[in-house]
Amino acid sequence: MSNIYSLGDEVINAENEKKDLGFIVSDTLKPSSQCTAAAKSANKTLGMINRTLVNRESKIILKLYQSLVIPKLEYCAQAWRPYLKKDTDVLKKVQKRATRLMIKDRSLSYEERLQRLGLTSLETRRLRGDLIEVFKTFKGFDNIKYTQFFTMSDTGLRGHKLKIYKL
């Protein structure tokens, strides 16, 4: 049962999802729609790279992938961070496709292709981005008080004063 909202005499329609600040926010707050849209956009760009390049040298495709495709997979990832396996698999599939374009050797696994190309997995890149944001918050580079998000340990143990209490 949904509520009916109005502004004056005009009825406002409820929406299941809305694009805001460049990413899709659903009423359930699940990132599935954003993951699908990001993967679709990244796949389009990867297909364009594949169709238009005559020179198939992996260094060239790698640079294009890093500058054109990865930003589409990572845009605002801290806000819509995928946590469902199906969502991470949709994004991982794009990177797997890209590594197959750059390395034609079918005997290599996905992880071996990543290592050979000097790439990290998308999950590792998202984790690194999260850690950078936490660092910036603790060091005061952002205008946010870290005590709003973290409970600090008050045990007088050795070390530094920025120990986070584990729940």
Image (tube, rainbow, N blue to C red):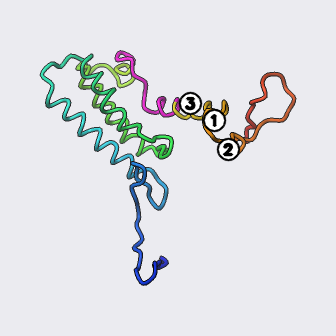
On the image, the x and y values in percent for residue 77 come to: 46, 40
Residue topped by disc 3: 132
The prevailing secondary structure element of the residues shown in magenta is helix
Mark drawn on residue 149: 2
Q: Residue at x 37, y 37 (%)?
A: 73
* In magenta segment, residue 27: no
Of residues 98 and 134, the one nearer the viewer is: 134
Mark drawn on residue 137: 1
Q: Residue furthest right?
A: 156
Please report whichever mark, 2 or 1, sits nearer to the chain's N-terminal start. Answer: 1
Q: Residue at x 44, y 58 (%)?
A: 26
Q: Which quadrant, please, contains the C terminus?
A: top right
Residue range in magenta is 115-128
On the image, the x and y values in percent for residue 49 come to: 20, 30
Of residues 116 and 155, the one nearer the viewer is: 155
* Residue type, label 3: Ile
Residue 115 appears in which quarter of the rendering? Answer: top left
For label 1, the SS is: helix
Q: CA distance from mark 2 to mark 3?
A: 15 Å
Q: CA distance from mark 2 to mark 1?
A: 10 Å
